[in-house]
Structures are given as C-alpha cells and as structure tokens.
Amino acid sequence: MSPSARQRRARAPGARRIPDIDKAAADPKGPVVSESRRKIETVVAFAVMIVSVLAVYAPPADEAGATGFRGADHLILHIRRMAFALEHLTGPSHALPGWYPRELLGTPFWSNLQNFPFLPTRLLVLALVDPFNALTAGAILAAVLAAALTFLFCRWIGLSPAASAAAGWTFACGGFFAARVLAGHLPVLEAYPSLPLLLLLAECALQARERPGAFARGLVWFGLASAYVPLAGHPQLPVYSLVTAGLYVLYRDRGRAGLFMLGAMGLGILVAAFALWPMLLLTTRSTRVLALDPPTNDLAFPYGRILAFFLPWTDGWPWIVAREPHRPFVAYPTAAYFWDTVCYVGRAPWLAALILLMHRCWRRERIDRRLTFIFLVGAVAFVLSLPAWHAVMASLPGTLLRAPVRQLYVTTFALAVALGAAIDCLIRITPRSSLRTAYVVIGVALIAHGWDLGMHDRAFIVPSRRSETLDPATALAIATSLHDGRIAMDYLLVSQWNRRFDDVGFFDSIMLARPYKGLLDLTGNSPTLNVQHMDGSSLTGRALAALGVRFLVTVRERSDLRDVAPRSGVHVYRVPDAADRVAFFPDASAEILSPARIHEQLRDPAFDASRTLLLRGDEATDPQELPAPPSAPAVVSYRRPSPDDVEIDVDAPVPGWVRLIESWDPGWHAEVDGATVPVLAGDDMFIAIRVAAGRHRIRLRFQTPGASTGVAMSIVGILGLAGLAWLAAKGRPIWSRQG
C-alpha cells in the first residue's frame, strides 16, 4: 500500500491504522532510533534475556558430579510412563500402545494425555534424552520458549526491547514455573508457554487483517497453535490460555476478522480431536463422573497465602526445598497448598504496575488497550482463584478442572507484562538528554530484581542422580517367579523395576470408574473415597489375593504376610493363594446380580472372589439350564504378545466363563475361535468372556474408544482451517470497526 493510499485509508470512516511494531520510532517525543540500531537493541536484549533464563535454570551438580533436576512427580510418575512409551516405540511394533497394564489392573494409555502428551516439544525431548533427564531438558526448553514468546508478544504490541526482555524473563522465572520444577510437574511446565504463544499469534493476525494474504497465513498459524496447546498433558493451563486468547480476539476485534479468528481457534481445537475426543470419552467413564468426596488436590488460593506474592517464605516450605535454615510448612493441611500457591514474581512487577497506574492517572492518559486487557484478565484470574469462587464451582456436579488456584498462571503473565510496560513508559517519558541515565537506573533495578527472583528460584533447582532401592538379586528372584501374576510395589520406591511389572497400585487423576470402585470395595474403604494415589501396601491380604498379586514390595512392615527377602533393603512379601491371572468359572459358579448387590458381595469379607464370578444382570442372562459339575478342572493358559493383545487357550469341560484379571473397558474386543463375542465385566471390574464346552482360543485386543472418530474430526478440522484461510486470502480486505 502506498503512503498516500494508507493516509486515505486512515481517514476513511471506520478504518483501522496498521499498528507500528515499535511505537517509539514514531513517537516525536521519544528517542530517535535508526532501524539498524533498533534491530541491534532487539537482538542484544533477546540474547541477554535467554542467557539470564539459562543462568537461573542451569542444572546443578551434586557431590557425585551428577547433574539434572530433581522432580518428585517426575521420578515416580512421568519417567516410568515415558520409559514404557519408548520401550514400544523403539521396539518391534514401533507403535504407541493404547493400553497401560502396569497400574490399577490396566488403564488406557495414550488416550490419557497425562500419560503421553502429543506435544512436539515432548517428542523432541524423548528423541534427544533418556527419560531420567527429560525433566531437565523439558523444563529448560519450556522456560526458554515462555521467555521468547513473551518477548515477541511485548515487542509486537510496541514495547521496547529492554522492556520486552524484562517481561519475558520475569514470566519464565516466576515462582509458578520454578516451583513446579522441583515438584516434577513436567506436563504443567510443557504447557507454560501456551498463553504468550496464542496472544502473539492472535496479535500478529489482527495486525495483518487489512492484508488478505498475510491475514490468511496468520489464521493458519493461530489455528495450528490452538491445536498445539490442548495436546499438553495438563488441562488447566491450556484451557486458561485458550479462553484468554479468545477473549483477547473479541476485545480487539468484534467484527468479521474477529469471527474469522475465533473460527480458526475452534477449527484448530478440532484438529487436535484425534487425542481430545478419546480423552473426553475416557473422562466420561472415569472417576470424574462418580459421586465421590471432594478431591484433596482441588485447591483454591487461600486468603492467608496472598501474602506469598510479597513474602514467599512466610509460611515455611517443604523439606525438599533447598533453603536453609529449614522452616517447616505446617500452616496448611498438606504440602499441596505450598506447591500450588507459589506465585512469587518479585516485588518489582507490583511496584512497576503501581507506578504505571499513578503516572497514567497523573497525566490523564489511557493505558494501551491491549495492556489494559492483559491487566484486567490477570486481575479476574486472581479473583476466580480465591475460595469464594471455588465454593460456587464445587456446587456443580462432576469434576472437569480441578485446582482453580492454577489460574494464578494468568496473573503471573499479567504481572510480568506490567513490569515491561512500566519500563517502556519510563523510557518514553525520559528526555533524550537523560536517556543514558535512565538506562543505567533501569539496569540496576533489573539486576536487583533478577537477583531477588533468581535466588528464590534456585531454591527449587535441586540436583538429582540415579539410585536403586531394590537389590538386583531380589529383583531377579521376583521376575523369575512372578509368571503371569501382578505385583504391588510402593509408588515412592525409586527403582528401575517399579512399573516394569504389572502393578495393582496407581497414581493418576483419571482412573477407570469400575476397577476403582471394585478396589474400594475389596479393601473396605468408604465407597466415596476420592484419592489419586494408592499403593498395594495399603490393601488387605484378601484384596491382594483377589487381584492376582503375588508379591508385595514395600517399606511398610506387615504381620499378615511372610517376608521372603528379610536381608533386602525393603520388605518383599509373598501373597498366599493369589488368584490366577486367567481362570475358568463354570455356569454353576457364576451368579447374576444387580450392580449394587455385586458391590455388596465384594465388600463382604466372607465372599471368595476366586470361587464365584459375579455378573451384572443388565449385561448377562441366566443360562437356561445348568449342566452337571465338571468331572475335571479346566485347563487355561495366558499369553500377552503386547500390551494391547492377549491370547488365552482354554479347554472347558462344561460351558462357562473365562475371567481375566484386567480392567474392563469398552475398548476391549474379543474373538472366540475367530468369532466376535461380547466382553462383559466380571465382578463389575474384570474382563469376562462366555465360552462353550471344549477347546477354544480367545483373542483379546484393545482399541482406543473414539480413536477413529477423533482422526476423522481432525481431518475435518484441517480441511476447515484450510478453507477458512482460503476465504480470507481470496476475499476483499477485512474491514471491521475497532473493538
């Protein structure tokens, strides 16, 4: 567009001036800076910011020379699931299993994004480092991306390079991020750059809306980012980012361009349906839909912890934090209140926001509308994180998003941008003759801010090295005598053998509802108990035997079981009379009951699950006649070629049922001698298959529910996004009134 055409367009009614990336260059009162110098300042500021981020998150070395981040959840959760995924991706099948047999009698694997996020950054980390070092690589990569994207967003809305670098560094080094490094919340860290990514691409597209070709490309990138963000393994941060970006688009443009962008966001989310749709279906058959007690990790931001914005250590800290002398965190019921409420970003952003507000009020000038939106949404997020709003959400049935305290993520971003905006304001109002002095003052202030926040962050950067709590001889003895049975090993035991065997314990926030309820019944727990972590050591001997557990490996002492490795560093108990992984029940040993009656029987200590199979009356029917008791026992064998495949050979003297101690799920499909047969829920939790008398081969295969539909939806989303971009590129320039 020529200068004269641009001027005519600017004078046209309802026209929108193309925003200048660097307003300082066009401000007659601001410093006159050449284009080349401006580029040099941008590159230097960006480089200093990235180096400063790396300095904060530089992996420490312990006395043994080992380097890497220590992260609680990573060592006991993420590292094991990444190892499972790599084992099969690099194995003969080169495929990601749909089923995870190593927890809670088996659970869906890749349809639970918390197990395997389809983020390109996660795939990159897995390709470059082993699972033990994945937290270190993933956290540093996420911090660098968060800083870089925040820097670019601030530059795109006109902030100076120094101001943008201060905002980017503060957001990447905020306590919300740093604390989760030590907590080992890798999925949260990976999702952290989501908000600046979406806001940056939204702003880029909006600034190009008068140029159809550029706007179309912006739509595509914004749509792809809207597909990328939900694939993270943590739901809260992606949801908050998408909602904030959608509101930002509406705030900036409520006309045709804004509608195009919201359409691109919706289609982008549809592109991610190959993973989101199976995840949604999994949620509908998980504990999230049960009438359970409130979860212990569903936390609001306690009013007493608001002081942590200014005095981060006021209530103490858990022992794992590297800060001396130690002051225990005892003001709240659990350490979760600490980890979810770390929100310190330094005192400088608060002071900067106050100064900016006072200056604008004194000069009677408005703050840039884009900055106003960021500040408002940060304040709203803070209010919605408080207990008052949490009480409102708790009154709604079901649980979709837990822990509203994590909305502080948006507040952290707003505070970081506020620091950049205040620095930018100071640079603009400073006379040219005093500009050098202003830069020195700003530099000293930023060094003090960096030292303050950086030292706070380093308390969460603790070294880690590999260790083993189970001696090799004991592990080998377990492996050779386990056969097709299950194991129960304490989740907190750091061992390469932990979750190498099929385990009965679990640590997850989305568990299949039927096996979870059955587990509560067999252990005698309250039917409304809501936990996301249960070790086999907390189960009764009756429950362990009924679930096919042959060995219990724990640090807890048990008097009801025999320790077969008394010289080992941990207790290894053999479970007597453990049920076989697969067993045959003749019709005479099967009872058809209502679901409520089945759970009453499971809860009854006198009920022997190894002798009687319970079937739901709404799924099975009574046989017309019961044959005579079998004269010889059935012969059953079990093989598992892969996590998704099970083969069973049975020689049944009479008609009956084959029961497999594996979680029932609608994704399981069975064939008996090549003919498709239904898969029922034995004891309302296990897999049960009807067979006639004689020899039969049963093949079971797990197919992720909703996978095909999700792929079809993703294809529709890709085509729709391409079509939307085509319409934008071929159409006339998109004029809309300024929102």
Image (cartoon, rainbow, N blue to C red):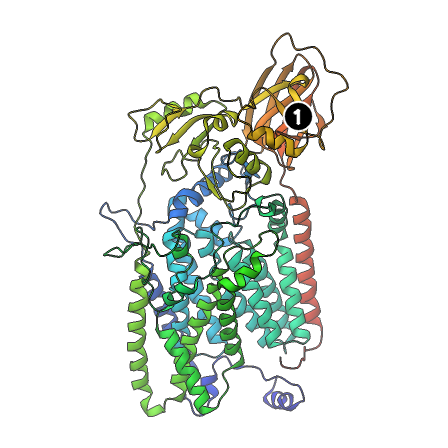
The residue under the point 69% across, 60% down is 720
- Which of the pair 178/595 is nearer the observer? 595
Residue shown at the point (67%, 80%) measured from the top left: 736
Above or below 520: residue 205: below
Residue 45 placement, left or right of 577: left
Q: Is any atom of residue 465 visible in this view? A: yes
Q: Amino acid at mark 1?
A: Ile
In the rendered image, the quadrant that contains the C terminus is bottom right
Numbered disc 1: secondary structure? strand
Q: Which residue is mark 1?
A: 689
Rendering quarter of residue 58:
bottom left
Percent from the top left, x then y, of residue 696?
66, 18
Q: In the image, is residue 521 above or below residue 714?
A: above
Q: Quadrant of the N terminus?
A: bottom right
Specify the quadrant of the image occupied by residue 301.
bottom left
Taking the image as shown, residue 72 lies to the left or right of residue 455, namely right
